[in-house]
Image: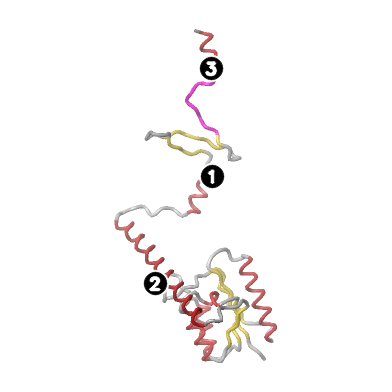
Amino acid sequence: MTRVATLARQSQGSEDSISLELQREQTTARATELGDDDPHRVDLGVHTGFSIFVKHEDQERIDSNDQVLDLLDQLAEGEFDYLVAHDDTRIARDQFYWVLVWHAKRGGCEVEFIEDVPSDDLTFRVSRVVEAEMKRKEIEKARAAKDRRREQGMYEGASRSDCSSTIAESTSFETPTSGRRSWRSSNYSRTGTRTRRSSRPSTASRRQARLRS
């Protein structure tokens, strides 16, 4: 009997996204074609594809995920004939990909993809290393900026979701007057229509003032 493991993962989005559903459906269908109607599913959902090669030990990493660690052991022990994923980046986005492939080869497991991957081995390897290096630099810059803000006692700010919920619940905002260091209230209706409070008298008020004079 053919034994198949499938792997599904995406870096961003929600657990019920179309991308994940397609990965699950397509890898399961491929497993059936290979002869396994009930494959072993490694469903990581929304999870980073980077490992210790790029990220720090205290960050979320694909190589610290329990399902992935179990899969490595199972591959090395020869429990599966095939490992099926949508494409190579679903397995990992950095050099950890080769770690998993090594475990698969050690146990006699063939790695298959739904989508075509670069046939040129050099291009395949270089693109992975370049992507991993770019991510590593991005993480280092973000960490350095965060450390600098902490050193200077600066407020690190609320998340976008916190800000969005606060704005959504409010019906009035403050907008600066041009050229002044003061603020005035500008109200928004429930429908989102902006109505500005003006300090100038209305046309009717000015007309009444002229008649009285």
Tell me which numbered mark, 3 or 1, is placed earlier along the sequence. Answer: 1
- Which residue lies under the disc numbered 1? 169
User: Residue, x 52% and y 49% (percent of image)?
Assistant: 165
Residue 106 can be seen, yes or no: yes
Position of residue 79 relative to residue 117, above or below, is: below
Where residue 26 sits, quadrant-wise, is bottom right
- Which residue lies under the disc numbered 2? 56
State which region is magenta.
Answer: 195-204
- Classified by dominant secondary structure, the portion drawn in magenta counts as loop
**Count of numbered marks:** 3
Tell me which numbered mark, 3 or 2, is placed earlier along the sequence. Answer: 2
User: Residue, x 56% and y 92% (percent of image)?
Assistant: 108
Position of residue 41 relative to residue 200, above or below, is: below
- Which residue lies under the disc numbered 3? 205
Instruction: Report crowding for label 3: few under 14, some 14 to 19, many 20 or more residues within 10 A (C-alpha).
Output: few
In terms of depth relative to the viewer, which is nearer, 179 or 181? Answer: 179
- Give the Cα distance between marks 3 and 2: 68 Å
